[in-house]
Amino acid sequence: MELPIHSFASGASAGSLAVADSVFGQPYKEALVHQIVTAYFAGARQGTKAQKTRAEVRGGGAKPWKQKGMGRARAGTSRGPLWRAGGRAFAARPRSYDQKVNRKMYRGALCSILSELVRQDRLMVVDQLDVQEKKTKVLLASLARFGLTDVLLVADDVSDALYLSARNLYWVGLADVEAIDPALLISYAKVVVSQAAITRLQEQLS
């Protein structure tokens, strides 16, 4: 499979790049992608919620009133689940929401997403992904040449100039190859990858 390469500085064509069908020519597996993305967001949950049971709340040692003759329902403690300031019947405990995902499934989901991005013409390869000056308007000029909005920039190595130029743009995502994950790839309308980054990404997924 051949992917066209564009010049990020001028917007002109800069040849093509041969990529493996095993990475960029896979069928889209919706169930697998859904499972991996769900597991990714589940793993990001803190799981630190905690509540107290009736045995853990303070007080409640004395019987509120005598058993009979009060005209009220029997009560042995004022810290039961039905009482104000009482303990919870099924108290939450700190827990982990991590879901097991093996390496083969994770790589398969990435290949499936990348292949679908290519089919939908949402993946663009550029010769290099960098700017000469630490100015947002320089990056905006480069993105305007391609009419890009809501875009993820994937570089082999994120330079300081590129980071400082993109950090004020809320609709521009920036990541290196190591930071790529399935949830990030499907979060943007367009993904722009440098030639060095896509070669490295292909080596990792092959």
Image (spheres, helix red, strand yellow):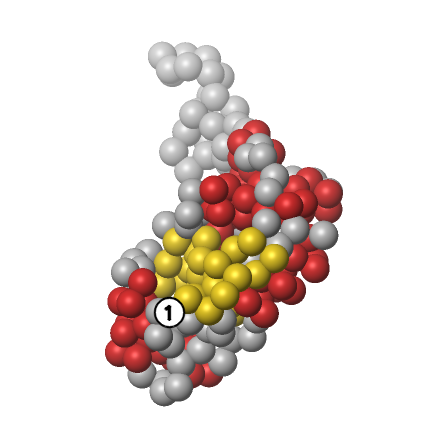
Position above or below: 176 against 58: below
Circle 1 sits on which residue? 12
Label 1 SS:
loop
Image height check: is 124 above or below 92?
Answer: below
Tell me where residue 90 appears, x and y as whole percent: 55, 29
Examine the rendering and report whether any part of residue 154 can be seen: no
Q: Quadrant of residue 38?
A: top right
Identity of the amino acid at label 1?
A: Ala
Where in the figure is residue 43, as x and y percent of width and height? 59, 47
Left or right of residue 19, residue 123 in this image = left
x and y percentages locating residue 119 in the rendered image: 47, 42
Query: Taking 33 as reference, is 189 above or below it?
Result: below
Q: Residue at x 38, y 33 (%)?
A: 84
Question: In the visual, does 32 lie left or right of 116?
Answer: right
Residue at (49, 51) in percent of width and height: 185
Q: Could you tell me if residue 165 is visible in this image?
A: yes
Q: Residue furthest bottom?
A: 133
Q: Is residue 7 left or right of residue 140?
A: right
Residue neighbourhood size for the residue with mark 1, other residues' Cα within 10 Å, grouped as few (<14), some (14–19), many (≥20): few
| Residue 131, x across and y down, in percent | 40, 81
Residue placed most toward the observer, 18 or 174:
18
Q: Residue at x 65, y 57 (%)?
A: 202
| Residue in the picture at 45% in, 58% down | 124
Q: How many marks?
A: 1
Q: Viewer-proximal residue, 35 or 16?
A: 16
Relative height, residue 142 to residue 53 (above, below):
below
